[in-house]
Amino acid sequence: MARRRGDKEDGGLDRHMGLLKLVQILSFLVVFVAGIIMGLATSSHISQYFTSQARLFFTNNIAATKIPGGNCTILRPCKTVDCLSMEAFLHPKNLTHSMTDKQLFWRASLMPTKEEYPFDRLPKVAFMFLTRGPLPMLPLWERFFRGHEKYFSIYIHTPPEYVLNVSMDSPFYRRQIPSQDVEWGTVSLVDAEKRLLANALLDFSNERFVLLSESCIPIYNFPIVYKYLIHSEYSFVESYDDPSRYGRGRYNRKMLPDIKLFQWRKGSQWFEIQRALAVHIVSDTKYYAIFKKYCKPACYPDEHYIPTYLNMFHGPLNSNRTVTWVDWSLGGPHPATYRGINVTESFIQSIRSNGTECSYNSEMTSVCYLFARKFHPSALEPLLNLTSTVMEF
Ligand SMILES: *[C@@H]1O[C@H](CO)[C@@H](O)[C@H](O)[C@H]1NC(C)=O
Ligand SMILES: *[C@@H]1O[C@H](CO)[C@@H](O)[C@H](O)[C@H]1NC(C)=O
Ligand SMILES: *[C@@H]1O[C@H](CO)[C@@H](O)[C@H](O)[C@H]1NC(C)=O
Ligand SMILES: *[C@@H]1O[C@H](CO)[C@@H](O)[C@H](O)[C@H]1NC(C)=O
Ligand SMILES: *[C@@H]1O[C@H](CO)[C@@H](O)[C@H](O)[C@H]1NC(C)=O
Ligand SMILES: *[C@@H]1O[C@H](CO)[C@@H](O)[C@H](O)[C@H]1NC(C)=O
Ligand SMILES: *[C@@H]1O[C@H](CO)[C@@H](O)[C@H](O)[C@H]1NC(C)=O
């Protein structure tokens, strides 16, 4: 004879009801006793502890703290570090982060609406090195930067596994940004440029952004370079209309209707831009996507994307010329590389000024270039010999 299921459950329910009553009574007791203890506590020194904790809680920032050994994350006041300090927000010291490009570009695109800064902002120049690894001209750059630490920041993009070995007192120490593989001639080169810009934008004091390679050298001293860039009303991005097959010939009609042939521009990838343009470039998705899709060899995104984009939307902020000298006179797909034997005083002097004038703001100047490329590692020694006599640093 099987018992009906309901019987058992009903009997069980009765027992449960009894237990529940007992539990209720017990919990009333617990609450009552706890109340007495709390009442006593408020009049004793314990209360001081509680209130001071509360004050800490409200005056400091709250951080998520991981309890060692456990796996819960609780909210706790920061006692030793100011987690949301202005200093860390404005001038991140540590370039290591785990943001994806998408997250990084979004953060870098944030622009204050308020015009005044709540701190003394000393505008800095961000020197962004896009390299294949080693920096053969490092000693020259270190000499160039020496003594001007307040006025610049350095960012280095290398192959992802590469570790740049520099001494702790070098301005290049710990300045590698989280990098990814770059395939020369593809859009990944533009990605690396945007990654450098975005990392540099996180420092709110960076005002001008220069892109350099490992074969670039400075040809003027730091104070001249700094003054030239900081006081320029315009950016220095080469942007010109080249009617040949190396210019307009690389345009793809599939870019219509967003990009028209007459808007298409060419220019050296080694740019120098002001903060506002850097923000626009890391923020653009639409035109970047068009280049990614339709500008493939023999179209090179690094030579067309930024020159075309600026021409379309921000032309009036651009000088359309570059501040990085290069020698194309030999012809061919690559510019001339200068070795140790080619470096002479008169050669460097001729790059600094060869009699040709350039426009700077509303004036003319004989200083057209601040940097030069391309220099072979063997050029380092003779260049170091010329710094005090020719380059004045
Ligand atoms: C909690 O931590 C223990 C050991 O530290 C681990 O075995 C367990 O999987 C963790 N649980 C969760 C939900 O993470
Ligand atoms: C920078 O951050 C990384 C990862 O967050 C950390 O391992 C490293 O110790 C930090 N370096 C400094 C100098 O704070
Ligand atoms: C880094 O450079 C120093 C000095 O030039 C050298 O002694 C050291 O072995 C180098 N370290 C690596 C990992 O290459
Ligand atoms: C550079 O070219 C843009 C058009 O893209 C133009 O608006 C601007 O005036 C030019 N800049 C100078 C300094 O001539
Ligand atoms: C460097 O000097 C060598 C030897 O004089 C010469 O053959 C070469 O063309 C020079 N290179 C450049 C880029 O001028
Ligand atoms: C000076 O340099 C500019 C730009 O490189 C070039 O166009 C010009 O021909 C040079 N002038 C002389 C006199 O060498
Ligand atoms: C550097 O200058 C010194 C002295 O002026 C000279 O002896 C040496 O040969 C020069 N080195 C190079 C590589 O030009």
Image (tube, rainbow, N blue to C red):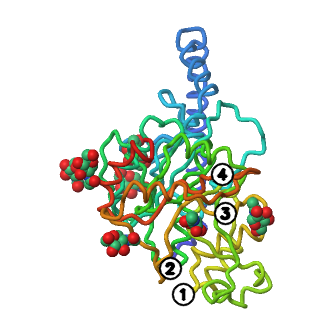
| Label 3 CB-ligand 4 distance < 8 A | no
Q: Note whether residue 109 is visible.
A: yes
Q: Position of residue 56 (x, y in %)?
A: 58, 23
Q: What kind of residue is marked 1?
A: Pro
Image quarter where the C terminus lies is top left
Front position in the image: 172 or 64: 172
Question: Alpha-carbon distance for marks 4 and 3?
Answer: 29 Å
Residue at image mark 4: 365
Q: Note whether residue 70 is visible.
A: no
Question: Alpha-carbon distance for marks 4 and 1?
Answer: 37 Å
In which quadrant of the rendered view does residue 323 lie? bottom right
Label 4 residue SS: strand
Mark 2 nearby-residue class (10 Å; few <14, some 14–19, many ≥20) = some
> Is 99 placed above or below 265 here?
above
Q: What kind of residue is marked 2?
A: Gly
Residue at image mark 1: 297
Disc nearest the viewer among 4 and 2: 4
| Quarter, ligand 2 | top left
Left-right relation of 255 to 323:
right
The answer to whether the residue labelled 1 contacts the one labelled 2, judged by CB atoms less than 8 Å apart, is: yes
What number is the disc on residue 185?
Answer: 2
Q: Position of residue 63 (x, y in %)?
A: 54, 38
Question: Alpha-carbon distance for marks 3 and 1?
Answer: 22 Å
Q: Position of residue 35 (x, y in %)?
A: 61, 21
